[in-house]
Image (tube, coloured by chain):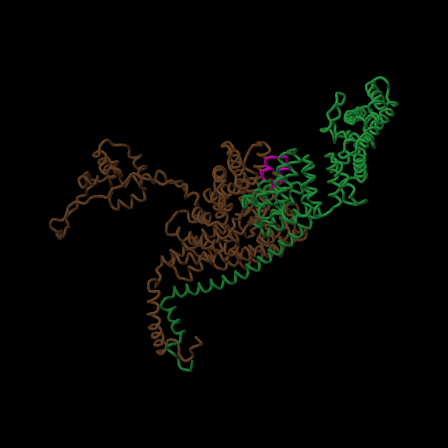
Chain colours: A brown, B green
Amino acid sequence: MTARPHVTEGSADAVAEERRAAQQLGPFLKKWFGWALPLGEPQLFMLLAVLIGLFSGLGVVLFRIAIERTQILLLGSALHPSTVRLLLAPTLTGLVVAVLVIHVFPRVRGSGVNQTKAAVYIFDGYVPFVTVIGKFITCALAIGSGQSLGPEDPSLQIGAGIASKMGRVLKLSQQKIRMIAPVGAAAGLAAAFNAPISAVLFVIEEVVGNWSGGVLGAVILSAVSSVLVMRQFLGTDALFRVPVFRIQHPTELLGYVVLGIVGGGASVLFIQFIAYARPRLRRLPRWTQYFQPAIAGLLIGMIGLRAPQVMGAGYPVIDWALHDQFAWNVLLALAACKILATGLSFVSGTPGGMFAPTLFIGAMIGGAVGGVEHLLVHHISGSVGTFALVGMGTLFAGFLRVPITSVFMVIELSGSYSAILPVMISNTIAYLISRQYQKTSLFDLLARQDGMILPSVEEMRERRTLTLENAMELTGKAPTPEDMFRSALERSGIAGDQYFLSGGTAGWRVFRRKDAPEDGTGALGAPRVESSPYLYPDQSLAEAMTIMRDWPICPIINRADPQALEGVVALADILRVYRDTAPDV
Amino acid sequence: MGSTPSTNHPSNAFLYLPKRYPRESTLLLLLAMLAALFVITGFVTKAFHQKEAGIALDWFTRGNAALEAGKAREARDDFRNALIFEPQNAEYQLHLAQALAAYGQAEQARGYLINLLNQSPADGQVNLELARLAARDDRISDSIHYYHGAIYGFSESPTQGLNARLEFAQFLVDVGDNSQAEGELTALAANVPAGAPNIHSRIADLYVRAEALNRALAEYEVDLRSSEDAATLAKAGATAYRLADFKRAEEYLSRVPENTANIPLKPEDLRSMLQISRMIISADPLAANLSNAERAHRTALALIQVIARVSECLTHLPAKGSEGLRGSLDRARYMHNSEWSERSLLESPDRVHPAIQYVFDLEAKADSFCGPALGMNLALSMMARSHASAVPPTNASPAVKRPVAEGSASEKGLSGL
């Protein structure tokens, strides 16, 4: 603006000048970009998904570097830091983080997954950008100082925050903005794990809850772009490398059944520890919140005196476990220490994620189970490292309750398909055990503790879809089409003289006589009956109600043979099914 | 530019964009920010990678120093620290595996090595380390498999390939598979790269251990043709001595300088072998190109020597049980005074062979009654071995084929090879 001192904005000169500029620029834009301008909302959304992926990827790269630089600065570069560092770094940093969380970034506390879900279901896609900055700073400090937390959940929220901000800047429609947070979440998680498939699956499985085509394409685009950026800067290698192995005999899979049982049990214990301790700590007086992360840090530092491996995200230690570097009893001790350390970090309100600790604990438990099985059964083919790999997925399935993601996660993190069968077996068992003994999933539990009732994706997954077959079960079988029709009319409570049933080459229809208009304007020769729509037995009740519109009854025909009448459903039947199957409130 | 507004000013055109296409303009702005962030992230990442690589290299250097100092545990921790910062570095992983193996954590070492092998199945060093681990655990077939992999993996690096093959041959000798070891050594000897120092001596040492003495002596001699190393001379002399090739034994042993360090044989054993060799050369009645008079003289002296030994020995033996030896001595005395006197032997040179065979047989019998021979008697025993195939055995000479009296000084010395 300062470059044009003689032209006052809004003046006649300015308007004329802009018009001239438009005349000059117009043909240029039309010639070269006419095909694309102006961008429609769908195109913009897809383009934005790529941009979100790129920005999130860069954000996550910087976040990872910030964590590692902080760790080198505070704990040094050795695996076994000095005692002073071990005790002071997490304690003092805990104080700083507490002050930041309480006074500067109050929304960084809690699970990034739930906050993204809250953005989708409660806040119309709004994730404050200050939360992104807050997550970046506080998590880098906390994880870098040795708190037993991981960078993936914060990365997910960083991605969601970036996406939300970009959606708002570009003034997307409310509907699109609501969908944009999961797109960013997938990008953040994909970059954090270098695992695009798992990130997409996790967001669909845990955040969005359905496979809507509109959001799926954008989620995939953003995940892929963020991983490309991450690989550009941090390398293309999988997070872990594991030896290839083959199952020599099907009976060896029994070993992984045992791992699934142990992993499921550990998952339940871990969730229940958090369910028990977190609300109790939160009920303590507010001033204690200044000290909770510091006390947790001090306790973790004390654990670190004997087991420094449990501090921080612990990826190198997982890698060692995958390479058979520990005896089974050491692995078991590390798993126990990590559960304690992670529990302390998390319930104290220190910001950070649970993904990396889950993988750590799973790897240690898996390795320990594998070590014991090798002692007992000598001919078992999978190494202890293989059990550690499968264990990662097992705890992921049992603790985070994302069974499909957990399988792909193991494949992507290891870059190997060789363990697919054991992973599927073990994960499924752990998931089922966890569901059996811990009804509420971790994310739902945390949301409820935070005072939010977010839709439970797990419950959505399990929800039974009611179909017309359920309505037909209630109406019972009638021998002839005429009987079916009469029975439906009776259930509807409507007079039979206005409706009749008729079959033809196009299939069965219910017909309704139309009254002539009272004002006598009805066209001569206009049809005096109208035919109903028709339904199929497998259609959902909701879909059936939409199709029936104002028809009180409707024929249900066979998909393969339209002339075969399966039944006649009444609107009253559908309402009765809903009433009979409604959960107690 | 001038003081009046210009309609052609580019800023005017670009001011038009945000008003006509606000979203597209914002996108352009975001792209510009993205480009800037890319550049910044690039700089930050590069600096961070350099820092990480520096830290990793520091730990790696410390680990190597610790490993060389024999502090395997420290080395293991240092290499692990290095791998925190460069987890995919194959060299660091290999060194960690070596440190783990040195610390006795073979299973842990194998985990890393198998992983490295999956990444690079033809890596010679990884195969070699796995072969060593397998050898340590007595998994012979695995070890052979990995040694073959190592030799193949080092095909581009002749020196390392040579060392791997030598190590493999040594492993085969250690497990007692001498025939396969000999085969490997023969292949190796045929493909020795130029300029490999003392390589023939190393091959020869392994040939000796595989009991392929002729090949061993030939390899020592190859090395001796290029440089006259005291240790090689000593080993060549000892090998020739074991082969009963006393002329060559004397030749090499006499060239070994006195008081030379780094010879894997005791000086007294070397002296003994040289002395015996010289005795045999000077007293052997069956040596080529001797005059009849000299041959008869040497045979008579040998007879006198063995009679003296047995006579002296019998004074310490009880009469009962030594009748056979006494009978042989009586016969020797009788023959010495009759058919095998120096004059008779000179007159009838065809009697030399039976006479000397009798001497050899009597020495062997004396060995079993009186213990290992010494001095000239030992020389006579060695002579017997030397001529075992040349002289037809008599009916009284079951022990003639025994090479050297067990436990003799010279045999003990040879075991040090």
**Horizontal placement of A113 versus A141: left or right?**
left
Residue B314 visible in the shown view = yes
**Residue stretch rendered in magenta on the structure:** B130-146
Quick one: A82 or A515, which is closer to the camera? A82
Quick one: B18 or B330, which is closer to the camera? B330
Look at 32% across and 37% down and name the residue there: A470
Look at 27% across and 32% down and name the residue there: A477
* Residue B109 image-quadrant placement: top right
Above or below for A468 versus B324 = below
**Horizontal placement of A34 versus A493: left or right?**
right
* Residue A10 image-quadrant placement: bottom left
* Residue B389 image-quadrant placement: top right
From the top left corner, tell me how far across and down residue A380 is, in percent: 55, 33
Quick one: B266 or A132, which is closer to the camera? B266
Residue B109 drawn in magenta: no
From the top left corner, tell me how far across and down residue A8 is, in percent: 40, 78
Above or below for B350 versus B61 = above
